[in-house]
Amino acid sequence: MFQGKFKKLHTLFSNDIGIDLGTTNTLVYIRGKGVIVNEPSVVTVNQKTGQVVAVGTQAKKMLGRTPPHIAAVKPVVDGVISDFEVAEEMIAYLLNRAQQHNKKFLGPRVVVGVPSGITNVEIRAVRDATKNAGAREVHIVEEPMAAAIGVRLPVKEPLGSMVIDIGGGTTDIAVISLSGIVQSKNLRIAGDKFNADIISYIRNEFKILIGEKTAEDVKIAISRLVPQEAPIESTIKGRDLITGLPREVVITDADVREAIRQSVDTLIESTKEVLEITPPEILSDVMKSGIHLVGGGALILGLSQVIQEHVKIPVFIADDPLTAVARGAGIILENLNSFEEVLILNEDELPPQK
């Protein structure tokens, strides 16, 4: 009874916030409201003054368009913090933005999603940056676990579930049972790698240099991993590598398919590797329940079909795959005691070594 009253008191004075700290986008969930912030993980900094110029969408618009003294920084690389101070500024901005209409007396209680298999040093960086940004209490959860909770898989049951979380910087392939990750693999092949593949292919095949934003626009517009009846085309503009002058060319879905083929093959092979070392009872469960695709990469048309053809297991795209991790973080916040086992322990919470 006392605990219930304390919990009600706590929610009066403090917000509960879930953060999906991504390489490309950071999403913020606030309890009772859902995912209310989805901003690019980009910060622009004035190098003369050291001041932050813009964060999120405004900063992303500046990518490739800044004068020499303004640097556009991505503080999260491959799912982990690469620039601590800038990451702190970004998290503080996003926390303030999420709470702008409902600021409370105490700092928020925060659950942050991180890639599976990151080091203790990287976990400490996330924890410290979030605390310095104003959080009162910080809990860390691995992203595939948060995603599985977000799409309502039975993670606490003695049943195997499998999630492939294809983000911007990393792909997490994980098999989950009894509140733990049984087998997992973290790849540096995800949305940003697909963009780099497209840039490289267009440079080699068409002798045109394009930027990251153009590559991403092409990926979203015409990527189809299964051949279509009629080709889908897109006109792109870039710099001719021979003349140095602007030029535009028309590319098709077949070009994008060829550009990202090798990366997709690696993703499929890694999925097979995880399945090969999964205990047979859990593998049997996965064969029944299927593989669940989450993250922005899940939206690439035909990807689920291609994976299914190669691994011979049904593959499902989660509802609203982009927000799965943030929603999972929110569900954990609403039932923190119940989901305690899925969280990564603080170093001071670890049992003493004998």
Image (cartoon, helix red, strand yellow):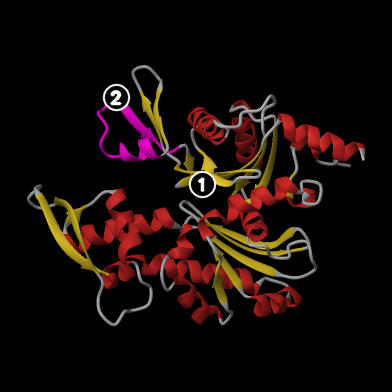
- Disc number for residue 22: 1
In which quarter of the view is residue 144 placed? bottom right
Give the image location of residue 134, x and y in percent.
62, 27
Residue at 38%, 73% in the rendered image: 225
- Disc 1 versus disc 2: nearer the observer: 1
Residue lying furthest top in this view? Answer: 49
Q: Residue at x 69, y 71 (%)?
A: 278
Q: Secondary structure at mark 2?
A: loop
Asked if the magenta segment contains residue 72, the reply would be yes
Residue 331 rendering spot, x and y as whole percentages: 69, 51
Relative height, residue 134 to residue 328 (above, below): above
- The answer for how far apart the CA atoms under marks 1 and 2 are is 26 Å
Q: How many marks?
A: 2
Residue at image mark 2: 69
Q: Quadrant of the C terminus?
A: top right
Left or right, 233 with respect to 145, comes to left
- The 10 Å Cα crowd at callout 2, few under 14, some 14 to 19, many 20 or more, is few
Q: Does 278 appear above or below 238?
A: below
Q: Earlier in the sequence, mark 1 or mark 2?
A: 1
Q: The disc labelled 1 sits on which kind of residue?
A: Gly
Element type where label 1 sits in the image: loop
For badge 2, the amino acid type reads His
Res 166 seen here: no
Boundaries of the magenta span: 57-74
Quadrant assignment, res 232: bottom left
Image vertical order of residue 155 relative to residue 286, above or below: above
18 and 275: which is toward the camera: 18
Res 59 → quadrant: top left
